[in-house]
Image: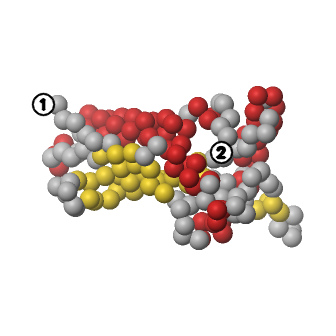
Amino acid sequence: MTKTYELCTHDAHLVLHNQLATPTFKNQQNTRPYRQFNKAGRRVYSNLMSVDYAWNQSDIIAEDPRTHGAMYVPIVAGSNKTTCLVATGHQEYHLVYMSPGMLTNTAHRGHGNDILPVAFLPIPKTLKKHHWKPAYQKFCHQMYHACLAWVFDPLKDGMTTPKVV
């Protein structure tokens, strides 16, 4: 017997584009990486654009003539389990949400559209006695990651070719 699972998703590129176009975020974006130090001269990591990885990615962008003028925009994604009771027959899903990683901490405290849902990943159900079997665990792992690959596929081209936003 073959079961099918429904993946509900938005276009991740469109969600990101809408987040970046939010007028309230105009002055709440770190458009370039930075290094921050406290009074004692020690490095302070206050958000994603203050880490070395962001700095290194910007160096890579700057070295390629095809990407001059482009900006590094990291994506932060998260997931948690939620239960949809209405019209789903008590179906459980993993809610996947995303945020542009170059927003300031002030933008994140504003409770706007800094973090938006982008997908509902299905959670397969089985009998309790099968839940810890390696085959079932492997299936869940593969389905979860295949769904995430599908959800974030619209962003893939922008990882190598700059997109104007």
Residue visible at 56% across and 61% down in the picture: 114
Amino acid carrying label 1: it is Met
Residue visible at 66% across and 31% down in the picture: 161
Q: Is residue 25 above or below residue 94?
A: below
Residue 111: numbered disc: none
Q: Is residue 30 visible?
A: yes
Q: From the image, state whether disc 1 or disc 2 is nearer to you.
A: 2
The mark tally for this picture is 2
Quarter of the image for residue 135 reads top left
Helix, strand or loop status at disc 2: loop
Q: Nearer the viewer, residue 127 or 3?
A: 3
Q: CA distance from mark 1 to mark 2?
A: 46 Å
Helix, strand or loop status at disc 1: loop
Q: Mark 2 Cα within 10 Å, few/some/many (few <14, many 20+)?
A: few
Give yes or no for contact between labels 1 and 2 (Cβ–Cβ under 8 Å): no
Residue visible at 15% across and 47% down in the picture: 127
> Which residue occupies the extreme left position in the image?
1
Query: Which residue has dot 2 on it?
Result: 165
Q: Quadrant of the C terminus?
A: top right
Residue 1: numbered disc: 1
Q: Mark 1 Cα within 10 Å, few/some/many (few <14, many 20+)?
A: few
Q: Nearer the viewer, residue 16 or 135?
A: 16
Colouring: secondary structure
Residue visible at 22% across and 61% down in the picture: 85
Amino acid carrying label 2: it is Val
Task: Specify whether 68 is left or right of 155.
Answer: right
Whole-percent x, y for residue 110 in the image:
59, 71
Q: Quadrant of the N terminus?
A: top left
Whole-percent x, y for residue 65 in the image:
81, 28
**Label located before the other in sequence (1 or 2):** 1
Q: Nearer the viewer, residue 141 or 57?
A: 57
Whole-percent x, y for residue 144 in the image:
37, 41
